[in-house]
Amino acid sequence: MTAQTPTGSLQDLLDSVPSFVDHLYSNRKGSVVKDAVLRQPPEFVAPEFTTWRDEQLAWREGVAFYDQSFHMTTTYVRGPDAQRLLSSVAVNSFETFGVGRSRHFVACSPDGYLVGDGVLYSVAPEEMVLVGRAAGHNWLRFCAETGGWDVSIEADEIFSNNPAGRRTVYRYQVEGPRALELVEQLTGAPLPEAPWSHIMPASIAGHQVWAMRHTMAGNPGCEFFGPWDDGPAVKEAILTAGSAFELRRVGSLAYFTNALELGWIPRPVPAIFTGDDLRPFREWLPSTSEEATWALGGSFNAPDIQDYYFTPWELGYGNVVKFDHDFVGRPALERTAGDDHRRKVTLVWDPADVARVVDSYMRPEDTPALYIEFPRATYATWQYDAVHDDQGRTIGVSTYTGFSWNERAMLSLAVVAPEYAEPGTRVSVLWGEPEGGAKSHPWLEPHRQVEIGATVAPAPIGKK
């Protein structure tokens, strides 16, 4: 039997279950690849336009085009207190922020663990726009509604949850070695040299667009956004001009693997399920929210939900933590700033061990290993697999797994103890859930756990 989510708040749900970890394990699992495809309207973003391998190669060798208009949540904060509100929530400094700037927004709990992150930008006075995953948005909206701030909130949900059938803006990216050549042809001039945090006006096909040096796999490129109704004409202009550069449209299968090369962990468990300070937020958040209905999975299997939390340093965000303002979590982060934190790394899985896992599917006389799906082998929203040393001790967690055709390797992004973070270090990933997946019945087939050898590499993997 699967767990039934009661009506009411997230706090009501927490109070009703003996183990919240077990509850999250029993939530609906399945192919996150297919779920991602379903969230992208196929008439706009196909699963594959050529093949996912060809599309991955494009961002490393040519020009890739991403239509990001559908899958990310957007929150608009407007009013005299917009920046002061964001500054009170984010670990980031706002000393140089303003119209025409962007930030990697990072929000933490009072205990100093990550609640959510995203991209924050402004293109109009007294207006802040947050783009990213749901967890950070819900926390920001709660703080805006309950903190007495002079702001208004507009929520623009992902396309699949949006009853309007449209978004406020389109969002496109071009990325790859030839992307800036394409941008120059589209806009009539090279983009000014500027860091990624600067947003610049430009014109494409007679439409004003906003341009930002931001890409998904860390290669040269640019993001364009503008009013939703201008989107089709701008897209057509990009695709037409891109044909001379062998541009590839990236489908949803390849798109959700670029984080593996960028070294960005997109789905850490939000640190909202514990702590008296966050109880009002949990009472505000409905039990139907993604924070309550998404699934936990993997071999890590710690009994306490707090064991799944990350600090900003563990996720590689320590450089954005600035103690020049008051914000939620500042005292906790100040206490731990000098600690020797766990490190984010890329794990390169041993090809022979991956092949043995695949071979087990073709031996009906044996219990197989857990199925590895290509190109992204993630079956739970929050997938945490144990990383072991050569003595079998757990020294970290592997959180995001998939295949990179550019690296010709199965990769995962992991957080490990600092003494295991040196590139070339040998570790292993425990693949498969405890008890043969019984905690996740009926969402996973019966399977056995296997150790898959891996070699530590930098995150991003191309970083020297």
Image: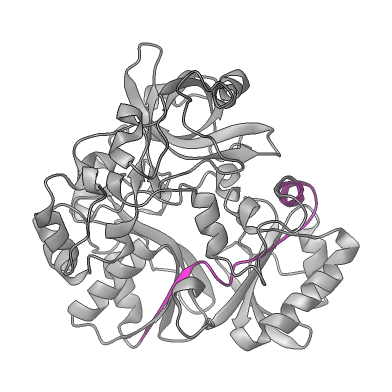
Location of residue 413 in the rendering, given as x and y in whole percent from the top left corner? 48, 38
Which residue is nearer to you in this view: 232 or 334? 232
- The answer to whether residue 73 is magenta is yes
Q: Is 143 located above or below residue 274 in the figure?
A: below
User: In the image, what residue occupies the spot 63% across and 37% down?
Assistant: 462
Location of residue 271 in the rendering, given as x and y in whole percent from the top left corner? 25, 52
- The answer to whether residue 135 is magenta is no
User: In the image, what residue occupies the spot 31% across and 51% down?
Assistant: 27
Q: Is 172 located above or below residue 397 in the figure?
A: below
On the picture, is 357 further left or further right than 291? right
On the picture, is 212 further left or further right than 248? left
Q: Quadrant of the C terminus?
A: top right
Residue 189 appears in the rendering: no
Residue segment shown in magenta:
54-78
Location of residue 144 in the rendering, given as x and y in whole percent from the top left corner? 26, 78
User: In the image, what residue occupies the spot 60% across and 85% down?
Assistant: 227
Location of residue 115 in the rendering, given as x and y in whole percent from the top left corner? 30, 56
On the picture, is 100 further left or further right than 437? right
**Rendering quarter of residue 231:** bottom right
Q: Residue furthest right?
A: 244
Q: How many marks?
A: 0
**Rendering quarter of residue 132:** bottom left
Q: Residue furthest front?
A: 365
Which residue is nearer to you in this view: 230 or 250? 250
Residue 434 appears in the rendering: yes
